[in-house]
Image (tube, helix red, strand yellow):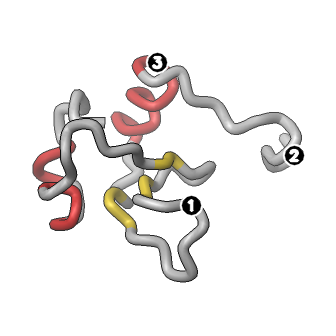
Amino acid sequence: MREFVGWAAGAEPAAASLPPDETVFLWDDLTVVRSPVAARPEVLWAHVTPQWRTFCAETLGFAVPEDIAPPHK
């Protein structure tokens, strides 16, 4: 995530204190959270821009699994 050009400027304050080896989770809406099972997830990134979408798809190789993806219209 830190490779994204806008990460430092756009991430929530809690993201700045993450250790380099911290595991974070990318949700299907492309937000980043610290834990996917917390009652109130700690959101680390919520700035979903076209550049972020491209980074997630091309750099991270992220795609929403077909079994949970919304139907195409």
Q: Residue at x 11, y 51 (%)?
A: 9
What secondary structure is found at the residue carrying circle 2?
loop
Cα–Cα gap, marks 2 and 1: 23 Å
- Quadrant housing residue 60: top left
Residue 71's tag is 2
What secondary structure is found at the residue carrying circle 3?
helix
Q: Residue at x 37, y 46 (%)?
A: 49
Cα–Cα gap, marks 2 and 3: 22 Å
Residue 50, above or below 10:
above
Residue 36's tag is 1
**Circle nearer the N terminus (3, 1):** 1
Crowd tier of the residue under label 3, counting other residues whose Cα lies within 10 Å: few below 14, some 14–19, many 20 or above: few
Relative placement, left or right, of 17 versus 56 is left
Q: Position of residue 68 (x, y in %)?
A: 82, 47
Q: Position of residue 73 (x, y in %)?
A: 86, 44
Relative placement, left or right, of 11 versus 56 is left
**Circle nearer the N terminus (2, 1):** 1
Residue type at mark 1: give it: Pro
- Quadrant housing residue 37: bottom right
Residue type at mark 3: give it: Glu
Q: Position of residue 15 (x, y in %)?
A: 22, 57
Identify residue for label 3: 58
Crowd tier of the residue under label 1, counting other residues whose Cα lies within 10 Å: few below 14, some 14–19, many 20 or above: some
Q: Residue at x 45, y 36 (%)?
A: 53
**Circle nearer the N terminus (2, 3):** 3
